[in-house]
Image: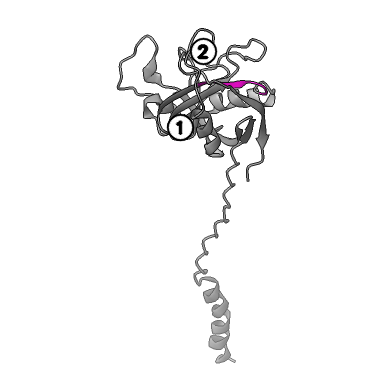
């Protein structure tokens, strides 16, 4: 019987040794796969005119104040029936066209805060739409579309401030994505050299004003 004791002790010790064995190293948890949320498409607006149609993409992310202002005019149908009343042609396929409420009190909404291109990061390139203004903060319901790249319309902080604050430039807020040929056609239209608009823009007034038939949001994407 005495010879069984060492064997018995050995059997009893085995479980104790097993319990003191190091546990397996924990495996790092696998991080869940993050699927990025796709960016919401920017709104688009189709402008139907007596010269044809073109479509704008509106930069509501980069220029939220100026873009929202334009979309208010669209959604309230305040641009239906207005005209392209000004054409500034500097050279072949270079200049800008201007359209909007032209001070009509029944169509014009309150002025908005100026968003310079130094803040939005936008540039006045071919097809860029921006808001016409006098002093910064006076922009309402008149808009220009550039034909050709025009960096002179961008804000330039290196220029000294002056009475008209031209160094702050104009507030770009979108660009033509379809129908740029229609905009160029408006630019190329004949000018009435003696006509003015409210006493201004002589030599820049179309002989036959192009009328906006409708301005409506259209699907994008």
Q: Position of residue 111 (x, y in %)?
A: 56, 14
Q: Position of residue 93 (x, y in %)?
A: 43, 34
Residue that numbered label 2 is attached to: 195
For residue 144: magenta? no
Q: What residue is rendered at 58% in x and 80% in y?
A: 12
- For the residues labelled 1 and 2, the Cα–Cα distance comes to 23 Å
Mark 1 secondary-structure assignment? strand
* Magenta stretch in the rendered image: 80-86
Figure check: 73 above or below 105: below
Closest to the observer, 32 or 100: 100
Closest to the observer, 213 or 35: 213
Residue 165 location, quadrant: top left
Residue 214 location, quadrant: top right
Q: Position of residue 54 (x, y in %)?
A: 59, 36
Residue that numbered label 1 is attached to: 147
Q: Position of residue 203 (x, y in %)?
A: 45, 16
Few, some or many C-alpha atoms within 10 Å of disc 2 (few <14, some 14-19, many ≥20)?
some
Does residue 4 appear to the left or right of 152 in the view shown?
A: right
Mark 2 secondary-structure assignment? loop
Q: Residue furthest right?
A: 76
For residue 82: magenta? yes
Which of labels 1 and 2 is toward the front? 2
Q: What residue is rendered at 53% in x and 38% in y?
A: 181
Figure check: 128 above or below 18: above
Colour scheme in use: one colour
């Amino acid at each position: 019987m005495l010879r069984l004791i060492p064997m018995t002790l050995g059997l009893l010790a085995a479980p104790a040794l097993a319990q003191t064995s190091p546990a397996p190293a924990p495996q790092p948890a696998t991080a869940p796969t993050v699927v990025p949320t796709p960016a919401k498409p920017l709104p688009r607006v189709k402008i139907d005119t007596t010269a044809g149609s073109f479509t704008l993409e509106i930069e509501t992310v980069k220029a939220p104040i100026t873009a929202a202002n334009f979309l208010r005019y669209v959604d309230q149908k305040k641009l239906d029936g207005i005209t392209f009343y000004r054409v500034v042609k500097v050279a072949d396929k270079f200049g800008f066209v201007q359209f909007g409420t032209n001070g009509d009190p029944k169509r014009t909404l309150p002025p908005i805060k100026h968003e310079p291109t130094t803040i939005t990061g936008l540039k006045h390139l071919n097809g860029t739409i921006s808001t016409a203004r006098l002093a910064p903060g006076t922009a309402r319901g008149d808009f220009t579309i550039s034909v050709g790249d025009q960096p002179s319309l961008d804000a330039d902080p290196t220029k000294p401030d002056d009475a008209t604050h031209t160094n702050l430039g104009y507030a770009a807020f979108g660009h033509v994505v379809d129908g740029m040929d229609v905009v160029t056609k408006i630019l190329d239209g004949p000018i009435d050299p003696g006509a003015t608009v409210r006493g201004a823009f002589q030599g820049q007034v179309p002989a036959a004003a192009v009328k906006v038939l409708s301005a409506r949001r259209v699907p994008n994407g």
